[in-house]
Image (cartoon, grey):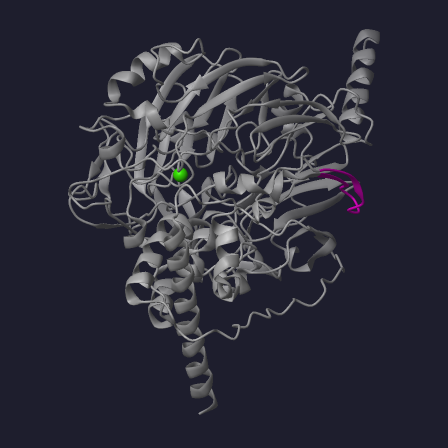
Amino acid sequence: MSATRAIWAAAAAALLLAACGGQGNSNGVTGERIAAADATPGEWLSHGRTYSEQRFSPLDKINASNVGELGLAWSFDLPENRGIEATPLVADGVMYTTSAWSVVRAFDARNGKLLWEHDPEVARATDIKACCDAVNRGVALWGGKVYYGTLDGRLEALDAKTGKLAWSTVTVDQSKPYTITGAPRVVKGKVLIGNGGAEFGVRGYLTAYDAETGKQAWRFYTVPGEQETDGAASDKAMKIARPTWNGEFWKIGGGGTVWDSMAYDPDLDLLYIGVGNGTPWNRELRSPGGGDNLFLSSIVALKPETGEYVWHYQTTPGESWDYTATQHIVLADINIGGQTRKVLMQAPKNGFFYVLDRTNGKLISAEKYVPAVNWASGVDKVTGRPIETAGARYEKNLHLSNPGPLGAHNWHPMAFSPKTGLVYIPAQEIPFPYMQPGGDKATFKYRPQGWNVGVDFLAAGLPDDEATLKAIRASLKGRLIAWDPVTQTEKWSVTYDGPWNGGVLATAGGLVFQGSATGEFAAYDAGSGAKLWGFDTQTGVVAPAMTYEIDGEQYVALMAGFGGGFAVSAGAGVDPRSEGPRRLLVFKLGGKQKLPARPVSTKEFMDLPAASGTPQQIATGTAVYASNCGVCHGASGVSNFSIPDLRYSPTILDADGFKRIVLGGERKEQGMVSFSGLVSDSEAEAVRQYLLDLARRQQAMQAKAKAAAKG
Ligand code: CA
């Protein structure tokens, strides 16, 4: 070896040591480190582990032959009693993760010692702007800083060593119903963050900020605004988008929020973003007379340094069902027809699995990954457009669609194993009856503090008798599907007791990990789907697991805690086993830690007063509840989570007290803002009478069931 080469080798070894060992890496995470993640498989540096977001780990010490010995190494009890959706990141021996209410924590990844905690103190009243719980999906790392978004629309940078705030910038107009729940990504020194709010009425966009200073670099709007130009990176692209819209869509924003998925190809230097649904959902009300409404429900490719538009593919033209294309995007190079193709894969809410050529956005193939999909019969290979079913747009009549707004696959990340060539999809069936408010003469009035989706939620409300609810619960399905993206066929699947199961992790150990809504964290054989291991997490799981290795020991980490859109809105559609304590759980081979016994639910109906509500009052209360209250407190008053289940709440016993909360905003600090602008005095009382009536009927049914059980 020449002297020069020896020096280079020593320098490279030192660099590698700095990258793998200790907590002293002064350069922090860089694009090179993320791009070369397979050289340091022990770490998990970016949301989907690599820029390709495959959620595949090359680690194999835990594998199909020994996973039976997997046990709890350490755990941390999360005080935030909401949905837990984050993927922890691990760099230089430290684990960084987020909890509900955008709280960030750093742990010693070996033993779970809490190193620091940062609470952005999001006002609890922000919850009224969040469609789907006060969740957060994680952090990004870059150059010694930790980046995360807050529910109230801030992007913040923390010192990775101390958790101290380095900079904070407000990325949204906080007077509007914007929220942030997604994890930022960092590409070429720019922190990328989108937002949510399309159920309420906002205009979607993605913004890039300088990682060092927090200064805005560019912004890409996904839908046109009132003005021809915004002076933004998207100005040119809006020339393509604007002719696909009609009417005064911009008045309530149009939607198209970029609330979750991003991926990056360093070779092509293309950033891919997933764009959400329209506001309102119903196109007839959003863009009268039709139109594709670009770039709703599209995958858009951009240049990461400038935000310049490169290409787009729209999965659901003229979106009308909340069929977002914000679901997890995976990049891979796979062999199709004897050729290695650079593909982008997505299983969006609409139920079709898309394989696109990521160099140009052209469709390679698309097939239903859930057979029950009924809004379209297929995707035309030439035009790339769906072949819609007559009546699916519910212009005249109710259409019972599958999927519904919660999707055949929601945000819960899938995983791709280059070893098996399979994509593992957390799929589900949650049908939904779409109907226009006002039937075939649709009426729509913007409500400043509510959902603005242009769909009749009363028609979609759950019934409240236990037998029907049981039947509905049985119709809700969840499966882990191993999907071959080349042949577009299912290789195997695991059936769960219901929908809304966790995200997925695939490993080189031949394993696929997934937690379920009923609280089992399981490992499956990646090739056959055989269950090899299971652990009772004591709570429904929605987040995906991740894995890392330190000092030769491989760990598997999972944020456990049920919540999110289905949990807060489906009420009695949720399996009661989903309720439980929120925790960070970390496993290793031979781990011996035990969780304390599972807490027992103590829900009991109160002593209820004699009925006083008139049938008219109860009918009014049912309608007012469905359009104002149900999306948080649960359809038909059934909430299994930390948002109070009003059937059990003493607040419904006191007419004046109830009004002080609903109209007076007495519990604003806890997140229950005043509805005085939307609900009248007599309507508030009608809602109270409806809830009392519900509680009475269900109490009577419970008593009957108990008596029957005693025989
Ligand atoms: Ca949505």
Expressed as whole percent of the image width and height from the top left, the position of residue 41 reads: 67, 34
As drawn, is 644 to the left or to the right of 4? left
Which of the 4 quarters of the picture holds residue 94? top right
Q: Is residue 501 visible?
A: no
Which of the 4 quarters of the picture holds residue 669? top right
Number of numbered discs: 0
Q: Which residues are magenta?
A: 105-118
* Most frequent secondary structure within the magenta stretch: strand
Expressed as whole percent of the image width and height from the top left, the position of residue 549 reads: 72, 41
Q: Residue at x 72, y 54 (%)?
A: 589
What is the quadrant of the C terminus in the image? bottom left
Pick the front one: 630 or 40: 630
Expressed as whole percent of the image width and height from the top left, the position of residue 20 reads: 76, 30
What is the quadrant of the N terminus in the image? top right
Pick the front one: 116 or 450: 450
Let me know if residue 692 is in the magenta part: no
Pick the front one: 177 or 204: 177
Height in image: 74 above or below 254? below
